[in-house]
């Protein structure tokens, strides 16, 4: 058996192992059999086998194109495309995560963050937002509040619209429903909406609180807070949820 054919078949085996390991990591975290950090470590094994599958598939592809031969085409193409898909998801997540600050709790108003009520007991010190915590980000060592105000001004800039607070409240409520979040509690009187968002792959739960207040005589202001329940670095998930929600609200 020529090596290119063997490479294609080995690539398919490596892809199958990578897929099985990735599935085990996701099921383990979602089922509560392991924590998120351990799930990431298991996923690293899937990435390793995915990389092997991609390398072997590339070897087959180069040989097939150079010699215009199609032996083991099904195995080679499946391994090539499958490994690219499998690797893209975790590597893209890690890349986006390392580009984000090492925090798991973000808000549009670091100086006066919205407070949880119904979700206050879901995590220790849920309403404690340490705006003065020092973190390292983009070559600087400064507070969480400074980093959010400096590098995420599109999120911390107040979003106030000329509309009654009641209308703004229901606009925020419908936007949360549109995001697919599970509404846990809401009060138009208090201008508060609480919801949870669950990530697709690992089932990570983020607790969300939205606050609507009057702004001036004719307007209303929206603020929100998103906090990963795992109390661990969430690789930018909280920031992405906030960005996506503000985009939905503005559309």
Image: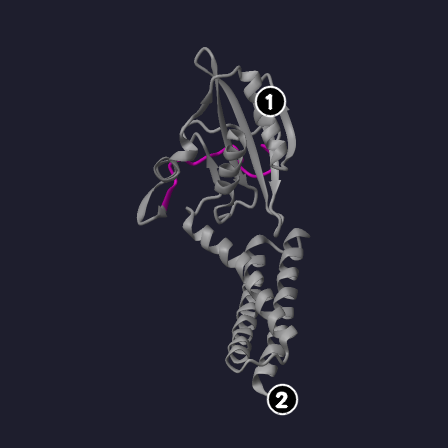
Which residue is drawn at the image coordinates 50% and 37% (left, top)?
242
Q: Give above or below for 161 relative to 118.
A: above
Query: Residue 189: horizontal and vertical position, in percent?
Result: 59, 16
Tell me if residue 224 is in the magenta stretch: no
Circle 2 sits in a helix, a strand or a loop, which is it?
loop
Q: Which mark is residue 170?
A: 1
The quadrant of the picture occupied by the N terminus is bottom right
The x, y position of residue 113, in whole percent, is 46, 29
Quote the CA–CA distance across marks 1 and 2: 67 Å
Residue displayed at 52% across by 74% down = 58
Dot 1 lies on which element? helix
Residue 245 spot, x, y in % from top left: 53, 35
Magenta segment boundaries in residue numbering: 119-135
Are there few (<14), some (14-19), or many (20+) residues within 10 Å of tag 2? few
**Residue underneath mark 2:** 1
Q: Is residue 165 above or below residue 141?
A: above
């Amino acid at each position: 058996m020529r090596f290119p054919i063997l490479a294609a078949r080995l690539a398919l085996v490596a892809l199958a192992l990578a897929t099985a390991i990735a599935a085990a990591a996701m099921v383990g975290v979602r089922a509560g059999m392991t924590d998120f950090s351990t799930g990431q470590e298991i996923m690293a094994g899937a990435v390793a086998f995915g990389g092997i599958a991609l390398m072997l598939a590339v070897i087959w592809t180069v040989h097939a194109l150079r010699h215009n031969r199609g032996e083991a085409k099904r195995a080679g193409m499946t391994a090539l495309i499958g490994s690219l898909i499998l690797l893209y998801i975790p590597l893209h997540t890690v890349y986006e995560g390392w580009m984000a600050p090492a925090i798991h709790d973000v808000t549009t108003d670091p100086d006066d963050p919205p407070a949880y009520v119904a979700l206050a007991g879901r995590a220790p010190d849920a309403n404690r937002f340490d705006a003065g915590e020092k973190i390292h980000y983009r070559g600087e060592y400064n507070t969480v509040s400074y980093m959010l105000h400096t590098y995420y001004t599109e999120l911390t800039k107040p979003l106030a619209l000329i509309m009654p607070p009641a209308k703004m409240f229901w606009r925020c409520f419908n936007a949360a429903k549109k995001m697919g979040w599970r509404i846990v509690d809401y009060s138009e009187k208090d201008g508060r909406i609480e919801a949870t968002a669950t990530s697709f792959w690992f089932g990570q739960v983020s607790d969300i609180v939205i606050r609507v207040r009057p702004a001036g005589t004719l307007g209303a202001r929206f603020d929100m807070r998103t906090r990963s329940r795992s109390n661990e670095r969430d690789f930018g998930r909280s920031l992405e949820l906030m960005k996506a929600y503000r985009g939905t609200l503005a559309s």
